[in-house]
Image (spheres, rainbow, N blue to C red):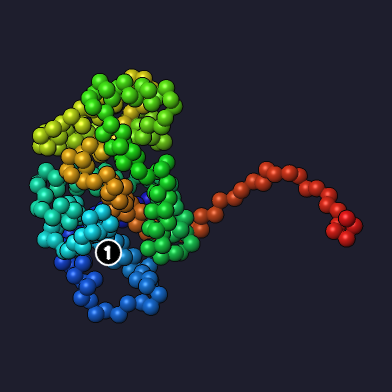
């Protein structure tokens, strides 16, 4: 498998880009003629350029959308930050992010970057197997991510823990949720059976962020939720759960949680698309018909 190779190349390239000046200004000022069909990846040899461009512009796209749609502001999409995480945070807040916030965003983007054949990644590879372009494959992946069973778990976790007033209250309310058979997001995983290794990492950073924030109550509530779910259901936190409190401590609005995931997972999607292309065979599963057996039908002329 060459996936690790492509993944590493994409992350190295992404963090070497001077995101604001080289990519955003080139978008405004470049006089290079554009393809008439708006597909910039005219040949697969341009796939690195296409994926690097997506990595560079996605933070600006989502921050511009959020600021304009929620506050009516048109922000400048150029910063002097030299990393994707730092660029995103400065676009969002308008201020230089702290070293701690830069570090946690880098960690978060790495943790979310790739996770083998989940629904969105599989969608991207199916699309790639038809020899479609990079942009269409990524669009298909985003469409799969939009479903609540795949994307949005960290947003749902944030909506839940914000309702709890204390660790004790969290356990009481979660017991009620289980009694009512309500779905609790952010726990368990289709692949992992005992723990999610990504959770341990983001949990430790959430604790540090809470201390830096000056109010760790949301972290302690999250820990209480983790304890309750393990004690009652033997369900562990996945990568999404403590991401909720971590993003909150950095001042990131809940509506941007899933778009941040896209900024990160784009790396994995692109790597899978490239790998599919290197030894392609169209992905076309077969299906077994389980309907009614063949029946005799009276000709219309005889009815």
Q: Which residue is mark 1?
A: 53
Q: Quadrant of residue 133?
A: bottom left
Q: Is residue 10 left or right of residue 121?
A: left
User: Residue at left 18%, top 67%?
Assistant: 22
Does the rendering let one see residue 69?
Answer: yes
Decide which of 282, 29 is in the foreground and name it.
29
- Residue 90 x/y as whole percent: 14, 54
- Residue 50 x/y as whole percent: 31, 65
User: Residue at left 14%, top 37%?
Assistant: 209
- Residue 60 x/y as whole percent: 23, 59
Mark 1 crowdedness (10 Å alpha carbons): few <14, some 14-19, many ≥20:
some
Q: Is residue 89 left or right of residue 156?
A: left
Instruction: Check disc 1 and report its element: helix, strand or loop.
Output: helix
Q: Is residue 219 left or right of residue 191?
A: left
Q: Is residue 255 left or right of residue 217?
A: right
Relative to 52, say whether 116 is above or below. above
């Amino acid at each position: 498998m060459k996936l690790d190779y492509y993944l590493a190349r994409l992350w190295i390239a992404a963090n070497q880009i001077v995101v604001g000046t080289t990519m955003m200004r080139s978008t405004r000022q470049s006089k290079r003629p554009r393809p008439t069909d708006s597909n910039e990846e005219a040949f697969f040899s341009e796939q690195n350029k296409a994926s690097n461009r997506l990595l560079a512009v996605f933070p600006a796209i989502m921050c511009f959308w959020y600021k304009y749609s929620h506050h009516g502001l048109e922000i400048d999409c150029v910063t002097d930050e030299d990393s994707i995480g730092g660029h995103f945070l400065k676009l969002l807040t308008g201020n230089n992010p702290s070293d701690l916030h830069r570090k946690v965003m880098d960690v978060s983007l790495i943790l979310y970057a790739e996770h083998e054949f989940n629904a969105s990644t599989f969608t991207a590879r199916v699309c790639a197997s038809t020899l479609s372009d990079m942009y269409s494959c990524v669009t298909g992946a985003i469409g799969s991510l939009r479903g609540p069973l795949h994307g949005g778990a960290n947003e749902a976790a944030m909506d839940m823990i914000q309702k709890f007033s204390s660790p004790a209250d969290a356990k009481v309310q979660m017991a009620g949720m289980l009694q009512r058979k309500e779905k609790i997001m952010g726990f368990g995983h289709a692949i992992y059976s005992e723990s999610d290794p990504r959770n341990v990492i983001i949990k430790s950073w959430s604790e540090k962020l809470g201390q830096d924030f000056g109010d760790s109550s949301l972290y302690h509530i999250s820990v209480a939720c983790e304890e309750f779910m393990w004690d009652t259901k033997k369900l562990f936190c996945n990568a999404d759960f403590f991401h909720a409190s971590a993003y909150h401590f950095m001042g990131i609005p809940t509506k941007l949680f899933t778009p941040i995931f896209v900024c990160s997972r784009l790396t994995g999607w692109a790597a899978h698309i490239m790998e599919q292309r290197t030894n392609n065979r169209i992905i076309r599963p077969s299906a077994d018909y389980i309907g009614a057996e063949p029946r005799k039908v009276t000709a219309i002329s005889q009815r």
